[in-house]
Amino acid sequence: MSEGPSKVPRRVFLKSTLSASMLSSAPILTSKAHAADAPTTSKLILQENALAGADDWQLTRVRVDGDGFRSPWIEGYCSKQSVEAGESIDVMVSCKPSRTFTLELFRMGYYGGKGARLIKKYGPLEATEQPTPSPGEKNLHECLWKPSLTIDIPADWLSGVYVGRLTTIPQPGESYWQSHIVFVVRDNRPADILFQVSDNTWQAYNRWPNNYSIYTHPRGVQGPWADVSFDRPYAREAQHNGVVDDPRTVGSGEFLPFEFPLAYWLEQNGYDVTYCSNSDMLTPERGLKCKAFISVGHDEYWDIRQFHSVEKLRDEGVNLLFLSGNSVCWVTPFRESTDGVANRIIFRGGPYGGGESHAVTRDKDHGPFPHRGPDEGLLMGARNVRPVNGGGDWTVVKPEHWIFAGTGVKQGEAIPGLVGWEYHGDPPEIDGLEVVAGGTAWQGGVNPQQWTATIYPGPKGNYVFNAATIFWAQGLSSPPGHVLPWSHWSRPHGPDARVQQITHNLLRRAVAVREV
């Protein structure tokens, strides 16, 4: 999130670009990695997406209260961010006034272009109005509602993002109302790609019930003053006041606008993908069973254990793809809920950045913070810069690089609007790091800042790619239920064959070179 105008000197960007241009353009991985269609280790995603999709899974009748955040007519949340197949998860639902309701549970994917498959329908079930908690210490809102139902996850449910649709059963003369719940089903199998949803960031921006998020404490929007709990519903997508204007996001965090286009495209193309939440990456074991790890969308808030886990992945040969912006920005410690459930409360503990100026300035301007994370640039290949938000075109710097194979792009060619609403820049000095794209992002025509997309070689024939924008997935697909975001008088244009081919090149190479 932006903290005011400041920019990296142009000489820093130019130095990085010129250094990159002098590096060898030879592939950084083995030759067999350049196979056009690398074999996958599993056909599970292909088999799943051959099943019939749902014609009706989106919210049809949705209503938010006068403050524009919550839907008290029906709303709910889950007892865990993710659940392993074979375990169970509780769903807490509140209705005002009390009503019976149904829950339809969908797995999100491609499914012949429909975007979701109905897994199971529950109900009718009873729901009463459950209490809105009073603000606790550091404005914490922790619901601790009674469960409305428990879902036993069969062992054969495939890992994925599962979105539930809650629908009231109206009394005569009434309308029905709807909202979502969302959770991840995870597994422990070897897989080609690990897709990490950015649910810490969803929760950091969640304003439920009435403008209470990490950003809304009276002491300031950037300090360590506010705690937020996963034990509450997701209000309408928190960026709707300038990035997304779609009330159909109620209850689903930021998945539908910023992450679903990537999941839809991966499954459309049959990639062997498995899913996890931020809280599943506190240790590296899950990721070490995969060939590639993807950070997607707006992945701002990381517990420092996530950082060290993903470092371990890189060092052990896993390919890292940061198809995201403003990522690894804030150290976000987890703690348990009041009733003892692990990893249910987070806060902004301090900046990543080590001794870099952007971290020192954040600490000075908004602290003191209890934590300081390492330099995120040494992991991602680029850093969070100030101002971190804005909009721009994704402009090719090094068209001869292997990531551009088959795209036909030329130096200086731009993919319009793909940079935003937050991004990365200021690449660190890493042996072999190459700036493959770069340019200027603007805050509505003012406060220019340089952004850089980078790639550098890992120690075992792997690579780390940083697309440097939250909007990368917007260039991959536009699934049902998706609305293009925008910001700062700039917007992405939707699916782009160049973005698709670049992503294919990255993933096919990742799949081909690492055995798990």
Image: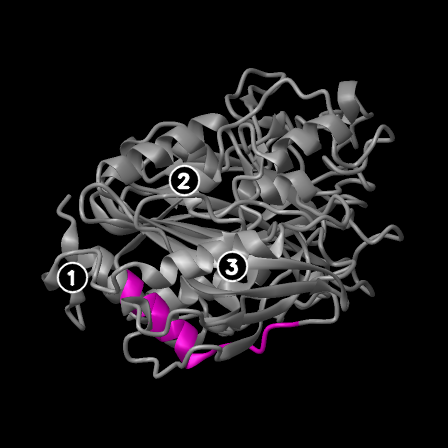
Q: Is residue 497 magenta?
A: yes
- Residue 455: where, in percent of width, then height? 36, 55
Q: Which badge, 3 or 1, comes first in the chain's sequence? A: 3
Q: Which secondary structure, mark 2?
A: helix
- Residue 399: where, in percent of width, then height? 36, 74
Residue range in magenta is 491-506
Q: Which residue type carries mark 2?
A: Leu
Q: Which residue is mark 3?
A: 14
Q: Is residue 360 above or below residue 159?
A: above
The way the protein has been coloured in the rendering is one colour
Within 10 Å of disc 2 (Cα), the crowding (few <14, some 14-19, many 20+) is: many
Q: Is residue 469 visible?
A: no
Q: Nearer the viewer, residue 232 or 468?
A: 468
Left or right: residue 5 compared with residue 257: right
Q: Is residue 486 above or below residue 272?
A: below
Q: Is residue 381 visible?
A: yes
Q: Is residue 405 above or below residue 438?
A: below
Mark drawn on residue 379: 2
Q: Which secondary structure, mark 1?
A: helix
Q: Which residue type carries mark 1?
A: Ala
Q: Which secondary structure, mark 3?
A: helix
Q: Which residue type carries mark 3?
A: Leu
Q: Which residue is mark 1?
A: 33
Cα separation between marks 1 and 2: 22 Å
Mark drawn on residue 462: none
- Residue 505: where, in percent of width, then height? 28, 68
Q: Nearer the viewer, residue 395 or 136?
A: 395
Q: What residue lies at 23% left-to-right and 56% top-to-bottom?
A: 510
Q: Nearer the viewer, mark 3 or mark 2?
A: 3
